[in-house]
Image (spheres, grey):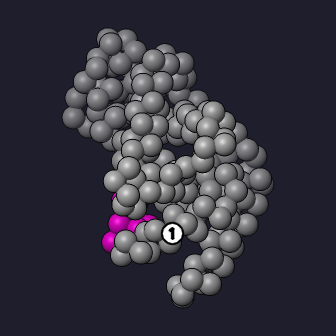
């Protein structure tokens, strides 16, 4: 099964119930999906892991609904987006934790912050916290995950113009916050 495309792996899962094929999809996408959730949850690693697990369970249960009209990764990010949206809606009054149960800060291992100091990582997640939910989602998908605007639109269900607006406002807010806190370009 080495070198099989996502579509070939999905076909193996659907047609032959090949769990090893699904495991390969999980291994391929678990880090990007977890990074997406780390950015959405302000660095809460426990919650990010739980949401990522929920995403892959839903993907496995619903994999027969994948029609190939978009890439598998777009379909998977759409599930992740919906998992986070459902979690956020259920826990609207609770909010996201930034502190772990042990009293220590949770830091991201995302590409934006993985080679940075813990302070920059914390500031980045704090800066993301200044954004609206839609701005944070769009900014995370573009800056952290490298998704183009058309894929962000497909993942979120927003039109491309709305995505561009959220990106513009979100990036401006991020830059302003980081500049006000001593980070220069």
> Quadrant where the C terminus lies?
bottom right
Q: What residue is drawn where x is 52% and y is 85%? A: 183
Left or right placement of residue 12 versus residue 168 in this view? left
User: In front here: 9 or 119?
Assistant: 119
Left or right placement of residue 81 versus residue 109 in this view? right
User: In front here: 94 or 168?
Assistant: 94
Q: What residue is drawn where x is 45% and y is 30%? A: 54
Q: What residue is drawn where x is 76% and y is 46%? A: 159
User: Is most of the magenta stretch helix, strand or loop?
Assistant: loop
State whether residue 100 is above or below residue 131: above
Report whether residue 177 is seen.
yes
Q: Which residue is mark 1?
A: 124
- Quadrant of residue 161 within the rendered picture: bottom right
Left or right placement of residue 63 versus residue 69 in this view? left
User: In front here: 174 or 69?
Assistant: 174
Q: Magenta stretch containing residue 111, yes or no?
A: yes
State whether residue 20 is above or below residue 74: above
Report whether residue 147 is seen.
no
State whether residue 41 is above or below residue 4: below
Q: What residue is drawn where x is 46% and y is 37%? A: 51
Q: Report the span colored magenta.
A: 108-115
Callout 1: helix, strand or loop? helix
- Quadrant of residue 116 within the rendered picture: bottom left
Q: Position of residue 89 (x, y in %)?
A: 66, 36
């Amino acid at each position: 099964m080495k070198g099989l495309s996502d579509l070939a792996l999905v076909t193996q899962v659907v047609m032959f119930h090949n769990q090893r094929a699904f495991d390969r999809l999980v291994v391929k996408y678990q880090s990007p999906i977890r990074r997406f959730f780390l950015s959405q949850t302000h660095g809460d690693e426990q919650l990010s892991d739980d949401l990522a697990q929920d995403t892959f369970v839903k993907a496995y249960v619903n994999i027969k609904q994948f029609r190939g009209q978009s890439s598998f990764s777009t379909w998977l990010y759409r599930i992740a987006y919906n998992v986070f949206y459902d979690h956020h809606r259920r826990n609207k009054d609770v909010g996201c934790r930034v502190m772990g149960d042990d009293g220590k800060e949770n830091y991201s291992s995302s590409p934006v912050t993985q080679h940075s100091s813990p302070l920059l990582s914390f500031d980045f997640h704090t800066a993301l916290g200044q954004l609206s939910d839609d701005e944070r989602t769009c900014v995370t998908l573009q800056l952290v995950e490298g998704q183009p605007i058309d894929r962000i639109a497909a993942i979120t269900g927003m039109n491309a113009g709305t995505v561009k607006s959220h990106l513009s406002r979100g990036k401006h807010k991020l830059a302003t916050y980081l500049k006000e806190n001593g980070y220069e370009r």
